[in-house]
Image: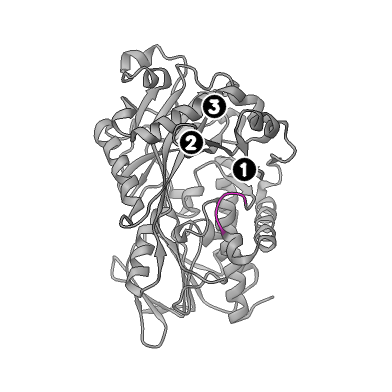
């Protein structure tokens, strides 16, 4: 067994920025970062190489590996506490904002300075939205683009690699808490590593694993939320007046029919829809690029309905996964339907898709989303599309495309203190896998925060 002072489980946004901060501060400690995915240069989705559909790589290159799920998904950093997580509830609003500003500075220093910083503050869009009962959340947005984001992460890896040991393709089978308070980490190939401080930075794809570790160690969790919806794709011209101004518009709407909240999420101007494999279940997401030559003629974004459950039901992730499995069962992966077909109560066929003016950027199976998504959520989504059509005419066109399903899992909100430490001394939980954050900016900020705390413990430059 090889011993370290600190082991970081997960090389996503929180793990990467924690390792960066530890390297920058030259911490007086030995550090190992483990991830079940591949190194950055080997993260290649087969769909990009010509595969027609998701082949269910294990693990998924889109979701796992150096940089985590954020690596190949648009590189969009929202500097705000209005959405994207609850980090400010633990560290304070001023500190959370300062950490996100610091993350932005690091990104710019690593090659992101040319990326435009957008803002929704004092935007005319906010006024127009309010006039139509839509609510635009305020944020500053740094859009790096998937292509630029990969280059930045490569530079961050080079910066850290001499100080931080990293091991990829390492799936952790078990974590043991020893009598002396140290931890033993056991991988699926039989390797064992010991450490004094263990950091769970597994991201959303590893939230189930983190939940299992917390259950084993008696650490409290809240499991009551999952977001279910669709990925909308339409001609970029429809949202051009919005995306050119603010790039990412986080719009919230309260439906008349059910009084439920629906929101836009992860807007990708001139982008493409992509498939993701989470625990063997194929869902959808979106990307966009900084390089104009890589842009498409479409814009895509998610419409999500938040579902919160009460006792006795506890496993909200299982609810979301069951809906995604049904979509995979009917479509062999992702289902695709024209909005016009949905509201007319008919499935989209290949013949109808051939006549569609909006060309899909992801090959998916034409079908009927009403056979997959529960009526309440689907009614909410349809009502939201008509509401958006008031500020972006053309959103409710017949040829607007809906991909299903998109699911955002928030399964385990792990109980941590103001230092993001659990009740087990030396065991920290941060990033999206902890339930504390739900965005690249806040996840990265949480990594910086815990990196500084551990540097104070072990000593370093500061």
Q: Is residue 257 left or right of residue 143?
A: left
Q: Which segment did they paint magenta?
A: 82-86
Residue 18 position (above or below residue 269):
below
Give yes or no for contact between labels 3 and 1 (Cβ–Cβ under 8 Å).
no
Q: Quadrant where the C terminus lies?
A: bottom right
Q: Does the magenta portion include 83? A: yes
Mainly helix, strand or loop, the magenta region? loop
Give how far apart the Cα atoms at labels 3 and 1 are.
29 Å
Does residue 284 show up? yes
Q: Position of residue 114 (x, y in %)?
A: 71, 42
Q: Position of residue 367 (x, y in %)?
A: 31, 24
Q: Is residue 306 left or right of residue 22?
A: left
Does residue 404 show up? no
Q: Position of residue 458 (x, y in %)?
A: 58, 81
For this rendering, which residue is in front, 244 or 380?
Answer: 380
Q: Helix, strand, or loop for circle 3? A: helix
Q: Nearer the viewer, mark 3 or mark 2?
A: 3
Q: Neighbour class for label 3 at 10 Å: few (<14), some, many (≥20)?
A: many
Mark before the other along the chain sequence, 3 or 2: 2
Residue 207 figure quarter: bottom left
Give how far apart the Cα atoms at labels 3 and 2 are.
15 Å
Q: Could you tell me which residue is drawn at 65 percent across and 33 percent down?
A: 130
Q: Which residue is mark 1?
A: 144
Q: Which mark is residue 197?
A: none
Q: Which mark is residue 387?
A: 3
Q: Which residue is mark 2?
A: 302
Give yes or no for contact between labels 3 and 2 (Cβ–Cβ under 8 Å).
no
For this rendering, which residue is in front, 289 or 360?
Answer: 360
Q: Is residue 326 left or right of residue 391?
A: left
Q: Could you tell me which residue is drawn at 71 percent across and 46 percent down?
A: 113
Residue 142 figure quarter: top right
């Amino acid at each position: 067994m090889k011993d370290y002072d600190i082991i970081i489980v997960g090389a996503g946004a929180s793990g990467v920025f924690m390792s960066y901060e530890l390297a920058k501060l030259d911490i007086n400690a030995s550090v190992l970062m483990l991830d079940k995915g591949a190194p950055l240069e080997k993260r290649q989705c087969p769909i990009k190489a010509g595969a027609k559909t998701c082949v269910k790589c294990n693990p998924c290159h889109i979701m796992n590996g150096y940089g985590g799920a954020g690596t190949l998904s648009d590189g969009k950093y929202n500097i705000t506490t209005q959405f994207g997580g609850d980090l400010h509830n633990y560290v304070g609003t001023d500190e959370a904002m300062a950490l996100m500003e610091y993350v932005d500075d690091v990104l710019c220093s690593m090659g992101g300075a040319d990326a435009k910083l957008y803002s929704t503050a004092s935007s005319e869009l906010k006024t127009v939205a309010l006039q139509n009962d839509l609510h635009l959340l305020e944020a500053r947005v740094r859009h790096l683009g998937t292509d630029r984001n990969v280059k930045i992460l490569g530079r961050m890896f080079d910066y850290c690699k001499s100080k931080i040991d990293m091991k990829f393709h390492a799936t952790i089978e078990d974590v043991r808490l020893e009598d002396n308070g140290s931890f033993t980490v056991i991988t699926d190939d039989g390797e064992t590593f010991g450490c004094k401080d263990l950091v769970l930075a597994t991201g959303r794809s590893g939230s189930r694993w983190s939940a299992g570790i917390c259950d084993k160690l008696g650490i409290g969790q809240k499991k009551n939320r999952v977001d279910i919806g669709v990925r909308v794709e339409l001609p970029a011209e429809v949202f051009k007046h919005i995306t050119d101004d603010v790039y990412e518009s986080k719009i919230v709407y309260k439906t008349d029919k059910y009084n439920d909240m629906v929101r836009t999420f992860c807007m990708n101007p001139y982008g493409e829809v992509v498939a993701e494999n989470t625990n063997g279940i194929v869902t959808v997401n979106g990307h966009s690029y900084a390089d104009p030559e890589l842009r498409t003629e479409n814009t895509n974004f998610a419409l999500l309905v938040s579902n919160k459950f009460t006792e006795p039901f506890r496993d909200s992730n299982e609810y979301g996964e069951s809906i995604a499995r049904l979509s995979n069962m009917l479509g062999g992966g992702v289902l695709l339907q024209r909005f016009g077909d949905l509201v007319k109560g008919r499935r989209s066929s290949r013949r109808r898709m051939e006549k569609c003016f909006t060309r899909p950027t992801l090959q998916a199976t034409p079908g009927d989303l009403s056979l997959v998504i529960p009526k309440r959520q689907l009614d909410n989504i349809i009502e939201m599309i008509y509401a958006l059509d008031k500020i972006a005419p053309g959103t409710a066109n017949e040829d607007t495309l809906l991909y299903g399903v998109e699911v955002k899992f928030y399964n385990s909100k792990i109980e941590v203190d103001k230092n993001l430490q659990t009740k087990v001394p030396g065991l920290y939980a941060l990033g999206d896998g902890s339930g504390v954050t739900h965005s690249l900016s806040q996840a990265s900020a949480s990594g910086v925060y815990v990196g500084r705390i551990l540097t104070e413990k072990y000593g370093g430059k500061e």
